[in-house]
Structures are given as C-alpha cells and as structure tokens.
Image: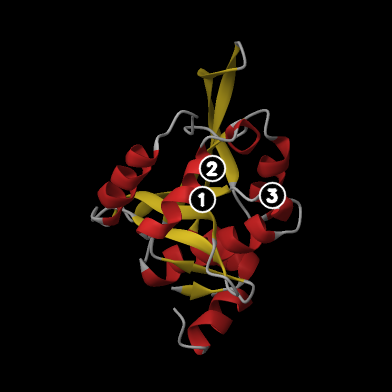
C-alpha cells in the first residue's frame, strides 16, 4: 500500500467492482484515455480484477479515499519486464469531482518513483491520446518525453485519433525529482508502503 494522505493506493478488492463499473462505463471519464472503452459488465470487472491480481508482470492498485476506503479509480504498472527493466504506466481517476486538483499528478509521481525505487526499473512508458493535452502537459511536467505517434490508433466519437507514446528514464527522473519524491518517502517512513 502507498499512503498519500488523502488517498491510499491499495490492492484491488471485489468491493471495488461497483465503483469501477460506474467509472469504466462513464464516457466522460474514459473518452480521453487510450485503451479504455465503455461497455463493461460487473462480471467483466470481477474477472478483470481476478486476472490482473494474479499476473506476475503487473502491479495494480485501487485509488481509495483514505477516510472512506471508497474506490475513486485505479492505477498500475503493466508489462513489467525485469530483464529489460521497463514497465508501462496507466491511471484512471473515475470520480470527476476530484479532477483538476493535482491528484493524478501526485499519484503518477508516487507510482513512477516506486517503480524506479522498488522495482529497479530503468524506463517507465505510457500511452496517451494526442487530443488529451492536459494529460500530456502533466506527463511532460513530470519528465516524460514523446517517443512517437501511432497514427489513427483509436476510434472515438466517429473519428480516428492518434496515440502518443511517452516515456521517462530513471536517470532523468532522478535528475528532476531527486533520488525519490517527498510523497514516496513520507509513505515509506510511515510504514504504509
């Protein structure tokens, strides 16, 4: 678990299904996310939790409100390759009332720091739709750089959209953020990690 004060990143649990069902079927939540689509049933999400909880090449967390333990989204590292020391980052904050408050930035910072410190990764990559300028700006502010564009990679609202590949390397991350972020050190010092 990673404790960020107002939210904790904890293991996915069956009680999260109802919230994930709402978020993953809310077009306003998923419309700017590459790889996510609507149309999930509760059974699909129960299976998704089981399948992803048992994979050796993934680390996934529920983003939960600290006071209520209510799921407000999920975040994870996928396709972790220990030999090549790389993994792929993805995040979904489903509670729209929390958008624009810096929560996604803090969670991204904590998870990427954790990937470099705890998993000894060399590279963390991600995919983002090119029309999601806000997310691209956040990722760039954290040190991610574009590695290329996959043209017409997604089909949304009657049009094809491009997908940007972005990545950050361990050395660049440490140069920008230090050997670890204050958020991750606070969580580690409080024994919540």
Write down the residue under mark 3.
138
Place residue 117 in its image quadrant.
bottom left
Q: CA distance from mark 3 to mark 1?
A: 25 Å
| Residue at x 48%, y 54% (from the top left corner) | 75
| Residue at x 27%, y 51% (from the top left corner) | 50
Relative to 86, residue 112 above or below: below
Query: Closer to the N terminus: mark 3 or mark 1?
Result: 1
Q: Could you tell me residue 124's position as x and y percent? A: 46, 52
Decide if residue 89 is in sight here: no
Q: Is residue 176 left or right of residue 119?
A: right
Q: CA distance from mark 2 to mark 3?
A: 25 Å
Q: Are marks 1 and 2 in contact (CB under 8 Å)?
A: yes
Write down the residue under mark 1.
19
Name the mark on residue 22. 2
Q: Could you tell me residue 126's position as x and y percent? A: 50, 43
In the rendered image, which quarter contains the C terminus?
A: bottom left
Mark 3 or 1, closer to the camera: 1
């Amino acid at each position: 678990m990673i404790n960020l004060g107002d939210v904790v990143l904890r293991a996915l649990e069956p009680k999260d299904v109802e919230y994930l069902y709402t978020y993953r079927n809310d077009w306003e939540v998923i419309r700017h996310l590459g790889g996510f689509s609507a149309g999930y049933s509760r059974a699909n999400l129960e299976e998704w939790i089981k399948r992803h909880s048992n994979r050796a090449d993934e680390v996934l967390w529920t983003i939960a409100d600290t006071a209520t333990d209510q799921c407000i989204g999920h975040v994870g590292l996928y396709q972790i390759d220990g030999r090549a020391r790389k993994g792929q980052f993805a995040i979904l904050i489903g509670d729209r009332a929390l958008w624009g408050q810096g929560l996604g930035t803090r969670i991204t910072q904590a998870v990427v720091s954790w990937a470099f410190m705890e998993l000894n990764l060399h590279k963390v990559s991600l995919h983002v739709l090119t029309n999601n300028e806000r997310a691209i700006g956040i990722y760039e502010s954290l040190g991610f750089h574009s590695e290329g564009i996959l043209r017409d990679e997604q089909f949304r609202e009657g049009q094809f959209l491009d997908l940007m590949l972005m990545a950050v390397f361990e050395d660049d991350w440490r140069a920008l953020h230090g050997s670890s972020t204050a958020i991750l050190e606070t969580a580690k010092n409080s024994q919540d990690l």
